[in-house]
Amino acid sequence: MKIKISEIFYSLQGELPGLGIPSIFVRFYGCNLKCKWCDTKYSFEGEEYKDMSLKEIINEIKKYKCKNVVITGGEPTFQYDNLISLMDILFDLNYNITVETNGTTPILFHFKGHINYVVSPKTISYSYSDSINYFKKCFSKFKIVHVSDDFVENIIEFYDLPKDMIIIMPFGASKVELEENQIKTFDFCKENELRMGYRLQISLFDKKRGV
Ligand code: SF4
């Protein structure tokens, strides 16, 4: 079994809810959505990935002392069976696992242990409602990108997201964009009593990858 992996690297988590936590990032290749504002297009466009076996991925992860693994993308559930197999092994090896997903595909059974799900809904559709409801039951955090006030308000209303599960992310795929937008997000969150997120990597390193 080979898994398409965009990159594996060690860093500090740059976004809430795990901001600042040292983590190993495993970026799956491929995504079922094509968001215009995506800041990781290299994770589903072009051919920039490696076909890796589970053993190769685990060996790469074991090079670091860190016990926190963030599985991200692209969209990790796009390679569903591979994702579950990797989660299974990491769980048995006592890793603390976070899965970042766009929330369009639920993990279709109760996984054998606790997983931190960070769900970032990007679009409104009845076809994703069951999946989002599933992730609500898993005590997930929902990160919504502040593309516009309407976009955020529509997502919260449509999926009926509880306020204490929501993090609003300032929009910005570069340092300049982030600086332009984060005060708008600050004001929006203040007015609507919502928690504001942050983009540590972009703020510190701009578009640099693997940091
Ligand atoms: S769901 Fe995420 S990874 Fe996929 S295109 Fe949208 S922002 Fe990019």
Image: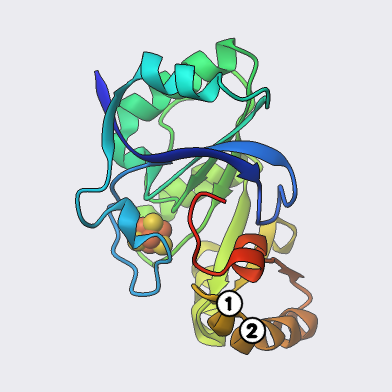
Looking at the picture, how far across and down is residue 186, in whole percent? 74, 82
Dividing the picture into quarters, in which one does residue 37 lie?
bottom left
Looking at the picture, how far across and down is residue 11, in whole percent? 63, 43
Looking at the picture, how far across and down is residue 20, in whole percent? 75, 49
- Left/right of residue 196 with respect to residue 59 in the rendered view: right
Dividing the picture into quarters, in which one does residue 2 lie?
top left
Question: Residue drawn 66% across and 55% down?
Answer: 14
Q: Secondary structure at mark 2?
A: helix
**Position above or below: 6 against 91:** below
Amino acid bearing label 2: Glu
Location of ligand 1 given as a quarter of the image: bottom left
To which residue does mark 1 refer?
175
Amino acid bearing label 1: Lys
To which residue does mark 2 refer?
179
Bin the neighbour count of mark 2 within 10 Å (Cα to Cα): few under 14, some 14-19, many 20 and up. some
- Asked if labels 2 and 1 touch by Cβ distance under 8 angstroms, the answer is yes
**Position above or below: 209 against 51:** below
Question: Residue drawn 56% across and 84% down?
Answer: 176
- Viewer-proximal residue among 105 and 200: 200
